[in-house]
Every structure is written in C-alpha cells, then in structure tokens.
Image (cartoon, helix red, strand yellow):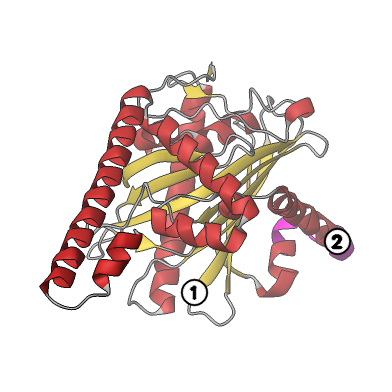
Amino acid sequence: LAKATELVSRPGRKKQGLLSLFANHCSFVTGQRLRRAYQIGELYSNLYSERTRWTLVGNIWRRFQNKQAPVGRLVAALAGVFMWENEKIEDEEITRCGLELRSLDSMKRRNSLPVEEAGEVEAGWESVVEKKEFKVWKRPIPDSHLYEYRVLASYNDVTPRQFFNVQLDTEYRKTWDALVIKLEVVDRDANTGSEVVHWATHFPYPMYSRDYVYVRRYDVDWENNLMILVSRAVAHPRAPETQQFVRVHSYQSKMVIRPHKSFDENGFDYLLTYSDDPQTVFPRYCVSWMVSSGMPDFLDKLHTAALKAKNLEVGIHDYTSRLKPKDAGRQPSPERLAGENAPGPIYA
C-alpha cells in the first residue's frame, strides 16, 4: 500500500497505469464478494423452502430493527421485507373492536331503544338499508368524500362458530363468492396470529377489478363471550401492485359476533364496521349507492354459505379450535398455504 501511494504521487503514465490497475483490482475483489454472496444465497435456496427463507430474513431484520429502529425501517423498506412489528394488529385494536358492540348496548339501555335504533342515534349514522335480518347505516368520513358503513345483523338459524369460520375460510369463499378473482394468505405472524391476505375482486362494469392487501387478526374473547375479526390495508412485498388490478390502499373492517347463548348453539348478533376507498372517479353518492345495493346481496350470500356449512353440504376449517382460554393471546391459524396441509380439523 505504501509503495502504491508513493507511485500514485508521481506524475506521468505510470500514475495512470497504476490507477487503472488499482481500479481493476477493486472491481475483481468486489466481483468475488458478490459471487460468494450469490453462492451462499443459492445454497440456502436449496436447503430451505421459500416460506422458511422469508421467515429467516424477517427475523434477522426484526432483530436489527430492535437495535436500530429508524435505520432498520429504512433498510427493510429498501430490501422489500415486511416488518410485522410495525404492521401487526395489536391487542388494543382487538379490545376496542369488542367495546363497540358493548357501547351500542349501553346506548340502548340509556335511551330505552332497540339496538337497531341506537345505531342511528350515535354520532350521525344514517340508515340506508333495513331488512328483517340486518340493518345498514352510513356516515361521512371527516375530510373525505367517502362513507363509513355499519351493519348490525341477527341470525337464529346458524351457530356463531359456523358463521365465524365461513368469514375466515379463504378457500371456501372462492366457491360461494363469484366476484372473487384471487384470495390467498401470503404471510403470517406466529406471535399474534395476524395474517396478510391478498384479495382481488370484480367491480361493477365498467370499472376495473380491484385488489386489496390487508392484515387480519381474529380472536375469541371467552370472558365476554365475543368473537372478533379486525382487518386493515397494508403493503407487502409478496403482493406488489400490478397493472392487472387497481390497488385499494385505504381499507378497514371490524366485526364482532356475540352469541345469544353459546358459540355452538343457533343464534347470534354481529356488528360490522367497514370503510374503503375504491379509487373511483364517481361522485360520493354513486359510490354510496353501489355499496348500499351490493352489501345486502353479499350478506345474503354469506348467510347462505354459513347454512350450507351447517347442513354438512361443505367442509370448512374450524379456526376457533385452538383458541383456548389459556392461550387466547396466540392464534395459530389452520389457514391453508400453498404446498402445506392445514393443521386444523375440518368443521361443518
């Protein structure tokens, strides 16, 4: 190095030649290191499955982020790694979701109103659909051209467990929802049971099909006799945007199911709060009309799908089978992944 420094300080062709030689040497060393890194990557590709490799990389970045949080987030974004610590659905979100149904009960008692009418009294909800089994409200989202929707329904011919499982079974939904183009779980957090789902669906003509990437988490509150499902939009490297669909970036859904008696006896109430931005150019009233007219049809299909599961016409996974009171904080999912057998039992 000293000799090279001495030669570089001299003028003339020798200096230029040495600089060229030095640059070639650096390129050779860099190439060797890149080749070695590629060989190591090939070795791990042969040893481990794709899902295991993603889990390994995620764990490495999670540890790195815990030590250097700001830098870790930046590097993870550049590397295309999904950070569960930032995107997972926390326990507090599950708890708040359960409190929404209980707040409706409190309002009903204070005002001596049926629970359906209590929904209208709270914070400007406007009734848009009313049927025997369910009622739908909407209210404007502040500083937006969009609406938030609320559904309160009651069924007496299906058990809460069957209805809950039908909500979660992505494979079964492909059979009863004709609008589904693609629906699959692309990632899962073993610590909380949260899952990332990629869902593509047809929209009414002449609109293009939309796709959603969202994280979801489900839980059973054994103490308060509730089943809870929370979903919201995220970005995930395994489901990048494509020109085939219009990506919906703003989406959230919260559902609470309360049995009339128990989880395995017919009869339950459920509250669904939902909002999204479908990225349309239509006025708000047009989007509101499409949602208001399409939601009753979807709820009827969902009810019919739950009845088929009850009548043993189809088999669905029991997602609640492992959510025991002692370990309700963790939700190992029996969701089927490509190349894997679902560990949960079949429930009908």
State which mark lies toward you, 1 or 2. Answer: 1
Compared to residue 297, the image places residue 48 above or below, namely above
10 Å crowding of disc 2: few (<14), some (14-19), many (20+): few
Residue indicated by mark 1: 146
Residue drawn at (46%, 27%) of the image: 308
Q: Which amino acid, by three-letter code, is at mark 2?
A: Ser
| 223 and 94: which is toward the camera | 94
10 Å crowding of disc 1: few (<14), some (14-19), many (20+): many
Which label number is shown at residue 126? none
| 218 and 273: which is toward the camera | 218
| 179 and 96: which is toward the camera | 96
Locate residue 169, reporting x and y percent.
47, 33
Q: Which amino acid, by three-letter code, is at mark 1?
A: Leu
Q: Which span is picked out in magenta?
A: 109-117
Distance from disc 1 to disc 2, alpha carbons, whole Å, reads 31 Å
Residue drawn at (18%, 64%) of the image: 18
Residue indicated by mark 2: 112
Apparent side of residue 207 relative to residue 13 in the rendered image (left or right): right
Quadrant in which residue 53 is drawn: top left
Residue drawn at (29%, 53%) of the image: 202
